[in-house]
Image (spheres, grey):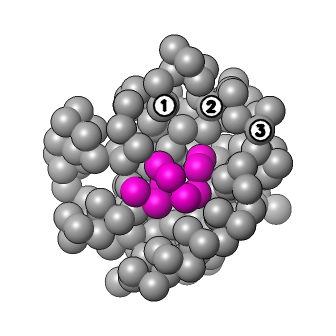
Amino acid sequence: MKLQQDNTLFVMIDVQEIFKHVIPEMQKVIHASTILNKAAEILEIPLLITEQYSEALGKTCADIYIPTGTRIIEKRTFTVFDEVIDPYIESLKKQKIVFYGIESHVCLMQSALDALERDYDVYYVANAVASRNDEDKKIAIKRLRDMGVQMVSYEMLLFEIMHTSEHPKFRQISKLIK
């Protein structure tokens, strides 16, 4: 069940401008998302970014690092598994999906549950997710853990992917998280 560079997809869900004003942990999510997005680029792991109805909710937060060439897809469904994104995810042929972003109990939870139904191994970066209400986040994490989703921190995740301090990108990743 270990994560590896060649079998993993990172999916950052709906970290959009409007949430800066309503989610207490938003700066933490922005910081963690930037680390994960930079790590995806360094480790050459595909990154998908979604935006929920950007006309009303705004684009991805401007202060989040987005690697050149990252696929950003707008959605209207709460899950990322819609008629546009689902085929894109399938085309990448990755077995493990790492989710982070906003909101823990809605879009992230529904995406994680749908990924489980599609037989993906699902990882939920618990220190890179948030909800307007912390109680909703806690309930979502418990439910997803009970359903078989792997709860990880971004540091745990990145070191697991590298597997050893001899990994060629170890120094670059270490600098990101310190």
Q: Nearer the viewer, residue 133 or 34?
A: 133
Note whether 79 is above or below 166 in the view shown: above
Does residue 150 appear in the picture of this structure? no
Does residue 140 appear in the picture of this structure? yes
Q: Which mark is residue 35?
A: none
**Residue 14 appears left or right of 45:** right
Q: Quadrant of the C terminus?
A: bottom right
Q: Residue at x 22, y 44 (%)?
A: 86
Magenta-drawn segment: 102-110
Q: Nearer the viewer, residue 73 or 144?
A: 144
Task: Give the alpha-carbon distance from disc 3 to disc 2, as whole Å.
Answer: 11 Å
Residue 107 within the segment the image draws in magenta: yes
Q: Position of residue 11 (x, y in %)?
A: 44, 49
Regarding mark 2 in the picture, which secondary structure is present there?
loop
- Closer to the N terminus: mark 2 or mark 1? 2
Question: Residue beneath label 1, please?
Answer: 51
When asked about the image quadrant of residue 105, the answer is: bottom right
Q: Amino acid at mark 3?
A: Val
Residue 165 within the segment the image draws in magenta: no
Q: Which mark is residue 22?
A: 3
Determine crowd level at label 3: few under 14, some 14-19, many 20+ residues with C-alpha closer than 10 A.
Answer: few
Q: Residue at x 48, y 31 (%)?
A: 52
Regarding mark 3 in the picture, which secondary structure is present there?
loop
